[in-house]
Amino acid sequence: MSEWTTETADWYAANYGEYATNRRAIELLEIAADAVVVDVGCGTGSALRHAAGKATMGTLIGVDPVPRMVEIARERLLGHPAAGRIQILEAPAHALPLADRSADLVLALDSYDHWGVEQAAGLREVRRILRPEGRFVVVKDGGLPGGEAAARAFVAALGGAGLAVVDERDVADEDVSFTFWVCAPRP
């Protein structure tokens, strides 16, 4: 992610680090108290901090390839009641430093587009770390650019990685509008 400089990360954190998509997407999800939640492209860690209120006994892991974003996420954890249960790791989506079948829930909240040319490899990694009953949630603010063709390509990419869409919703609230996909591993 060479385009993400320290300045870019600081700008993003200031403008989108606590974006309403993170809060609202977590509100829509059922998360078990003991879940292992992984946020790929976690940015400032906002979604994980929200998820900690549901996964009250779980483990929360943020993964981001940008060193400055990792620093910011760790800084924002200071003093958070769940800080001891939240880890922030530096790695790209296509090389997740996690064990096979170790995650109950994997999130990509407005990060999938940033996986770039490694999207297919990133999806295979998500499939690898998901438990058989796990879920992968993708959120895209404003939906996928490119309309129906982009949606078909996205679903095909998921299928190629062994994932299937089990729920798709457009969400519009007073402060945010996004598309929300819940995906499950295919046997």
Image (spheres, grey):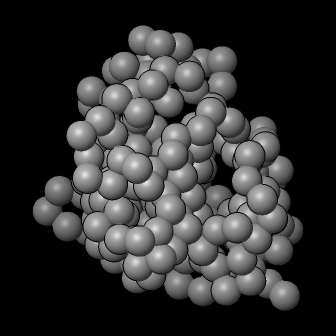
Q: Position of residue 143 (x, y in %)?
A: 46, 60
In the depicted structure, whether residue 18 falls above or below residue 102: above
User: In the shown orientation, is residue 161 left or right of residue 65?
Assistant: right
The foreground one among 138 and 38 is 38
The foreground one among 152 and 42 is 42
Residue 49 visible from this viewpoint = yes
In the depicted structure, whether residue 23 falls above or below residue 76: below
Q: Quadrant of the C terminus?
A: bottom right
Residue under the image location 47 percent in, 13 percent down: 6
In the depicted structure, whether residue 41 falls above or below residue 3: below
The foreground one among 59 and 117 is 59
View extreme (left): residue: 174
Q: Position of residue 107 (x, y in %)?
A: 53, 61
Q: Position of residue 59 (x, y in %)?
A: 50, 62
User: In the shown orientation, is residue 41 left or right of residue 134?
Assistant: left
Residue 110 visible from this viewpoint = no
The foreground one among 26 and 103 is 103
Q: Quadrant of the N terminus?
A: top right
| Quarter residue 66 falls in | top right
Residue under the image location 81 percent in, 64 percent down: 100
Residue under the image location 51 percent in, 46 percent down: 87
In the depicted structure, whether residue 76 falls above or below residue 42: above
| Quarter residue 131 falls in | bottom right
Residue under the image location 24 percent in, 40 percent down: 79
User: In the shown orientation, is residue 69 left or right of residue 103?
Assistant: left
Badge count: 0
User: In the shown orientation, is residue 162 left or right of residue 141?
Assistant: right
Q: Position of residue 84 (x, y in %)?
A: 40, 50
